[in-house]
């Protein structure tokens, strides 16, 4: 059956702008984008375990700003949160669970992005 996650997609009205947000703010490295004419339609960044992609809302068949499922693992959630706030983002307070710490913020299109730091030794 299921082997792994191939990719996850976030919808965008402006794929180039959203790609640049993830590149400039979170440091994701995107491969060459797929464009039609001068319009970027799709871009993806390889991460351990799969790909994170941004795609036109038309292609995704979901409105821009409606995604809320990506959760990126970070080494230091406190410092990452401080860095994002310094960049002008509104980042939620960190929520502690018995096994992890979480926080969230909206991306440039209004999609919800979450950060995760495991507190369990592997």
Image (cartoon, helix red, strand yellow):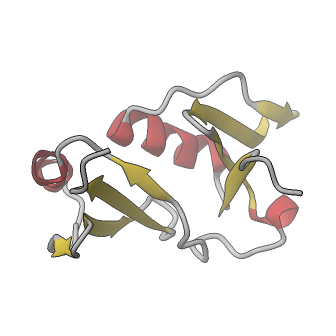
Quarter of the image that includes the N terminus: bottom right
Note whether 7 is above or below 91 in the view shown: above
Residue at image point 76% right, 74% down: 62
Tally of marks: 0
- Lateral position of residue 43 relative to residue 25, left or right: right
Note whether 56 is above or below 28 in the view shown: below
Residue 33 x, y percent position in the rendering: 73, 30
Residue at image point 43% right, 60% down: 107
- Lateral position of residue 116 relative to residue 67, left or right: left
Residue that lies at the very extreme toward the top in this rendered image: 32
Residue 27 x, y percent position in the rendering: 38, 32
Residue 25: image quadrant is top left
Q: Nearer the viewer, residue 39 or 55?
A: 55
Residue that lies at the very extreme toward the front in this rendered image: 122
Residue 36 x, y percent position in the rendering: 89, 37
- Lateral position of residue 105 relative to residue 94, left or right: right
Residue at image point 52% right, 26% down: 29
Note whether 92 is above or below 71 in the view shown: below
Q: Nearer the viewer, residue 47 or 112?
A: 47
Residue 99 x, y percent position in the rendering: 26, 67
Residue at image point 61% right, 39% down: 49
Residue 122: image quadrant is top left
């Amino acid at each position: 059956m299921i082997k792994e996650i191939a990719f996850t997609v976030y919808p965008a009205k402006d794929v180039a702008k959203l790609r640049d947000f993830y590149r400039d703010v979170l440091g994701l490295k995107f491969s060459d984008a797929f464009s039609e004419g001068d319009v970027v339609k799709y871009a993806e960044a390889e991460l351990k375990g799969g790909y994170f992609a941004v795609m036109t809302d038309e292609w995704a068949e979901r409105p821009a700003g409606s995604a809320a499922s990506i959760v990126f693992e970070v080494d230091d959630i406190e410092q990452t949160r401080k860095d994002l706030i310094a960049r002008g983002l509104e980042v939620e307070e960190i929520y502690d669970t018995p096994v992890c710490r979480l926080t969230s913020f909206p991306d440039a299109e209004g999609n919800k992005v979450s950060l995760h730091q495991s507190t369990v030794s592997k």
